[in-house]
Amino acid sequence: EGVSELAGGAHRRQVRVHVTSTLSLDLLIYLPRDHAGPVPAFLAPNFYGNLSVHADPKILMSRSWMRQNKDFGIVDHRATEATRGVRSSRWAIEAILSRGYAFCTVHYGDIDPDVNDGFKNGVHGAFPSSEGERTGDAWGSIAGWAFGLSRCLDALEQDAGIDATRVAVMGHSRLGKTALWAGAEDQRFALVISNDSGCGGAALSRRQFGETVARINEVFPHWFCRNFHAYGADVSRLPVDQHMLVGLIAPRPAYVASASEDLWADPRGEFLSAKHSRPVYELLGAPSLLGDEPPGTNVSVQGSLGYHRRDGKHDVTELDWAHYLDFAALHFASKDD
């Protein structure tokens, strides 16, 4: 624990979360300097280790498997000092802290390596199947990462500085899919944010626009259960679609965000998924305020459901975070009030 240079001296905590005797996760927490009592928080998994989210020299080096990226100083799937702060542009930590929220993050590779390894490592290796061969509905990596986020929430419940009843889970891309699943599976998450999550996340599968069910299961066969693979050739046979996933979060607030140039993630399909989850929110007395067509570019609509489509590519920007912070302020009591 220590005091960082962030936001004039935010409190830094680094907590090792022991899930089993063979699996542990490193959770990085920044608390606002002048927090009085427990504060609401954002919990978000990261791609390149906790040290990648900010140049803070005190953030511990990741010990786990990491996606190879020589530009980010990641060689042989291990972080180096050159990795420090390489993804800071995606994390508006100063803005989050200045609005009275804690920022919490965990490296997704701590939970499960993002490789098709036969489910032998990470969280799956910690919970081996007792039935021999895996069943068709056995969990994949998306479910594994979501399980890890719930274990991080367990830890936040033990932190006197965090109000664990007001934790928003946020994820980008494949980790946006993960955030949606974590929010659907664990009702303790009070607010859920999907940023450019695409196929298997917020985008409707039946549109078959951009990344498709067939393509995602071909390239990333470990992400979902094996039963999902059976629908690649005919998605019309799917008994569900992604608006139902958003609906499972109701009546808790959910935010779906897209980017205009991120056609692989199908911005239109992401909006339609939020739109078609409206009946569930309305049934449960939580009006969405979403119209039948998406709002103008960079404009955010915020009720129990939130949505925006910003200019640009597949990324997380300051504008995205500005909308998420406003959405959290709408639903959480904070220093904004």
Image (cartoon, rainbow, N blue to C red):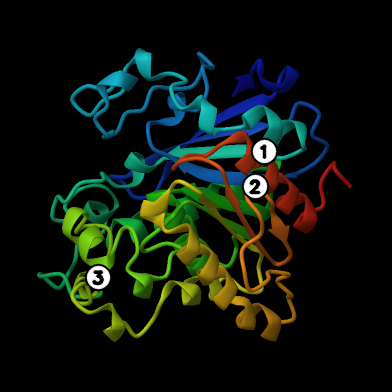
Does dot 3 land on a helix, a strand or a loop? loop
Q: Residues within 10 Å of mark 1 (few under 14, many from 20)?
A: many
Q: Amino acid at mark 1?
A: Ala
- The reply to whether discs 3 and 2 touch (Cβ–Cβ < 8 Å) is no
Q: Is residue 181 above or below residue 152?
A: below
- Residue drawn 34% across and 46% down? 111
Amino acid type at circle 2 is Asn
| Pointer 3 residue | 138
Is there CB contact under 8 Å for labels 3 and 1? Answer: no
Q: Of the residues shown, which amino acid type is indicated by label 3?
A: Ala
Query: Looking at the picture, does residue 289 appear above or below residue 170?
Result: below
Element class at badge 1? strand
Calculate the distance from the C-alpha at mark 3 to the C-alpha at mark 2.
Answer: 39 Å
Picture coordinates of residue 264, whole percent (x, y): 36, 53
Q: Position of residue 55 (x, y in %)?
A: 51, 17
Q: Which mark is residue 298?
A: 2
Helix, strand or loop under label 2: loop
Number of the label disc, if any, that sits on residue 102: 1
Front label number (3 vs 2): 2
Task: Point out the residue furthest to the right here.
Answer: 337
Residue 185: % across, % down: 48, 68
Residue at 66% x, 55% y is 296
Regarding residue 119, the answer to whether it shows in the image is no
* Residue 300 x %, y %: 69, 54
